[in-house]
Amino acid sequence: MSHGEHTPADRQDLDGLVLGIWREVLSGPVGPDDDFFALGGDSIKAGQIVARLRKQARTGLSLAEFLAEVSTPRELAALVRAKAV
C-alpha cells in the first residue's frame, strides 16, 4: 500500500475518532452529517476539536481550515485524510 492510501479500517477509525471528539466537545449525540454550528458549535469549541484532533490524529489541521472548510464530521475526516497525502 502506498503512503496516501487508506484501508477501510483506517477510514472507520478516523471517522470514529472525529465523531467521538465532536460528541465530547459538543456534549451530545452527533451524526456524521450533522452541522457543527447547528449543534451549538462556536469558535471556542472549534478550537477544542482542532486541538484534540491534532494531538490524537497527529494532523497539522489549523483552526482557520476548520472554520473555512468544515461543517460536518464527515467533511473533517475527509480534510484530515487529504492533508495526510
Image (cartoon, rainbow, N blue to C red):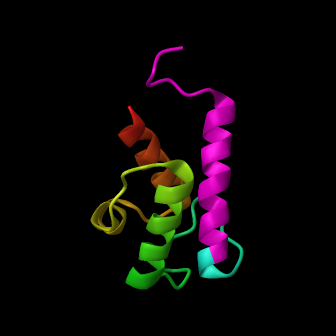
The residue shown at (48%, 49%) is 58
The residue shown at (69%, 33%) is 9
Left of 5 or right of it: where is 7?
right
In the picture shown, does residue 4 fall above or below 33? Answer: above
Residue 43 picture quarter: bottom left
Q: Position of residue 23 (x, y in %)?
A: 66, 72
Q: Which residues are magenta?
A: 1-24
In the picture shown, does residue 6 fall above or below 47? Answer: above
Viewer-proximal residue, 5 or 39? 5
Q: Position of residue 29 (x, y in %)?
A: 71, 74
Residue 31: in sight, yes or no?
Answer: no
Q: Quadrant of the C terminus?
A: top left
Q: Given the current orientation, which residue lies at the most extreme top position?
A: 1
Residue 1: in sight, yes or no?
Answer: yes
Viewer-proximal residue, 63 or 70? 63
In the picture shown, does residue 28 fall above or below 5? Answer: below
Would you say the magenta stretch is mainly helix, strand or loop?
helix
- Residue 19 magenta-highlighted: yes
The residue shown at (59%, 57%) is 18
Q: Position of residue 20 (x, y in %)?
A: 67, 63
Q: Quadrant of the N terminus?
A: top right
Residue 73 picture quarter: bottom right
In the picture shown, does residue 61 fall above or below 43? Answer: above
Q: In the rendered picture of this protein, how many numbered marks are placed on residues?
A: 0
